[in-house]
Image (cartoon, rainbow, N blue to C red):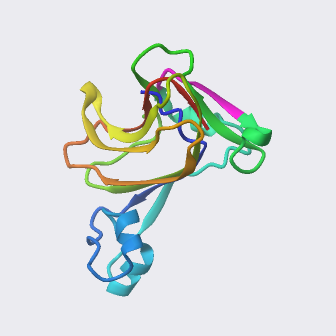
Amino acid sequence: MTLCAAACLAALSAYDGGASAPSDSGSSANRTAQPFAPAPSDSAKSGSDFRTEVLFSDDFEGGLSEFSGYVDKGTAKISAVSGADALSGKQSLCLDSMGSSQEWILAAELGKNLKLEPGKAYTVEFKYRLADASNQSSNNYVSAAGKGGKFYARSIFAAAPGQSGSARFAFILPPDAEDAALRFSSHGACRTI
């Protein structure tokens, strides 16, 4: 899987695992965008304790060293793109697996120095553009996964070359997810900014 996906990994936030589930009140946009944790405005209305801890946030304007420091494994070439290729600012992250002939490609696994805790809720947000694919499409995924191919949560965010937008992935790790790491992967080789 090569989810050479994150062009701007805007924020990886951990939410208090004890936060209450979203209620039927509030806008449907908030319930859809964050199915596992209430939006801060909903939490404030209900009076529940809502704490946000940002684990990682980067616009990649200062380079890729912080992101690269979290990559434990993966086969994608990690680089910065600039100029017209950048999604915003002067440069963006690019995960490139175009040289791979594998069907499923693990582009990058963020398991080094970034500990995800069982029982906590997380939201991952980033901008992306699927720049190239070796076939007509290349499904790009962001997931929380453990050893032995065990997936705790997974979401597709891009499939067709030229597709771009903002992705938001929310999940709660189960109590047995001691080995969970954040993964970017794809079904087919691609170049995702």
The N terminus, quarter of image: top left
Image vertical order of residue 38 relative to residue 66, above or below: below
Is 79 displayed left or right of 179 in the figure?
Answer: right
Residue at image point 66% right, 29% down: 79
**Does the image show residue 49?**
yes
Query: Could you say which is closer to the camera, residue 122 or residue 92?
Result: 92
Q: Which residues are magenta?
A: 73-80
Q: Residue at x 22, y 49 (%)?
A: 174
Q: Is residue 153 above or below residue 104?
A: below
Give yes or no for residue 164 being in the magenta stretch.
no
Tell me where residue 186 sits by quadrant: top left
- Residue 93 position in % (x across, y down): 64, 38
Q: Residue furthest left?
A: 176
User: On the picture, is 12 further left or further right than 192?
Assistant: left
Q: Is residue 75 magenta?
A: yes
Give left or right: position of 137 versus 23.
right
Front one among 169 and 98: 98
Q: Image point 50% across, 15% down: which residue?
A: 100
Q: Residue at x 66, y 36 (%)?
A: 64
Question: Residue 140 lies in what quarter of the image?
Answer: top left
Residue 188 lies, with reference to residue 169, above or below; the image says above
